[in-house]
Amino acid sequence: MSQVRINNDEVDIVIGAVQADLTPFLEDWRPFISPFHLIIVQDPDLKGEVKIPGGFNADVYSKSKIDGTVGSSAAALFSGYSCRYFGYLMSRKEYVISIDDDCTPAKDTKGHLVDAIAQHITNLQTPATPFFFNTLYDPFCKGADFVRGYPFSMREGVPCGLSCGLWLNLADYDAPTQALKPDLTNNRYVDAVLTVPVKTFMPVSGINIAFNRELLGPVLFSSFKLEKEGKIRYETMEDIWNGMCVKVIGDHLGIGMKTGLPYVWRKERGSAVESLKKEWQGVNLMEQVLPFFQSLCFSKEATTAEDCVKELAAAVKEHLGQTEPTFARAAEAMLEWLKIWNKNNSAS
């Protein structure tokens, strides 16, 4: 991994607390996260107070604090692991790193613990190359460079706005795959980072992710949330929807996105069958909307992330919301998020 400058004052680490006792999680991560400011957001449905050990610089946000900041009606956007989005809202740092509370540090092929924080910052502080693929993956990684034939005019790259880490053990499989292959785990540690090419979409998960808040902050929102008057959650489809929104906006603005390192180790949790019951309708909807994102074009006037969110919300409402109420609500939630974002940032 190439060496980059890490200023502790430029990094917030967001933790969505779905379990009450964070002591084991924080102790596992202490060597890597103790120098940084932590934003711990408690799932509003979690009863009692979150337990954290001493020695951390942490702000903890409970349901009452969420309600007091955004109002009780908007607070519905932040239930479950989507509570991490509230942490994005409260951050004031350039770099935001989010790791879920069911993850521990992974080990590399030599048995060394992986410093996921340092790797995420490396990914974000070195350029991305979305417009021409480098066959040695990230040319800015230690021991790599641009290969023969890579255009010299494109070697400066573009800013990297999003770093999507991976995980070992419980891989990012959907509920149908988990249900059919319950013993399938990921044991392959691939020592590589790559830029996702422009016009190419990817499944994004907030489990192990980092982003440049100044470049993409308004785009990391929770909006694809509820169906049938709040009785059914689409579970992981919230991240998938937001990932497509982030990617299409990043492509338009010339902001790159990387995936690969760093890895975390994810513990198994939950029932694949129960998740399948909750998310199968969402999986079907995501298949239907892909052509919409593939053909979406922004205007020349959309020069900021906020401009793009407004245009995207209008397009979602016009082209998807007419036939599926879920998307009409998503469009409204995107605009509501912008209002919350601007109000909260202007007050800081």
Image (cartoon, rainbow, N blue to C red):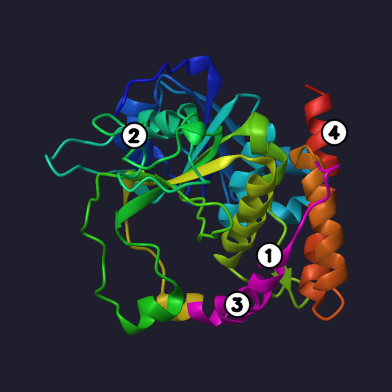
Circles 4 and 2 in contact, beta carbons < 8 Å = no
Query: Is residue 61 left or right of 277 when viewed as pictured?
Result: right
Residue position for label 2:
29
Figure check: 82 above or below 143: below
- Secondary structure at numbered mark 2: helix
Residue position for label 4:
343
Residue 41: x and y in percent read 59, 41
Residue 287 bears which disc, if any?
3
Q: Which residues are magenta?
A: 276-302
Tell me the kind of residue under disc 2.
Trp
Disc 1 and disc 3: Cα gap in Å? 11 Å
- Residue pictured at 79% horizontal, 56% vertical: 312
Image quarter (top left, top right, bottom left or bottom right) of the C terminus: top right
Among the two numbered marks 3 and 2 on one chain, the one whose residue lies closer to the N terminus? 2
- Secondary structure at numbered mark 1: helix
- Residue pictured at 59% horizontal, 50% vertical: 43
Tell me the kind of residue under disc 4.
Lys
Disc 4 and disc 3: Cα gap in Å? 34 Å
Among the two numbered marks 1 and 4 on one chain, the one whose residue lies closer to the N terminus? 1
Residue 144: x and y in percent read 27, 34
Circles 3 and 2 in contact, beta carbons < 8 Å = no
Disc 4 and disc 2: Cα gap in Å? 33 Å
Among the two numbered marks 1 and 3 on one chain, the one whose residue lies closer to the N terminus? 3
Q: Mark 4 vs mark 3: give the one in front.
A: 3
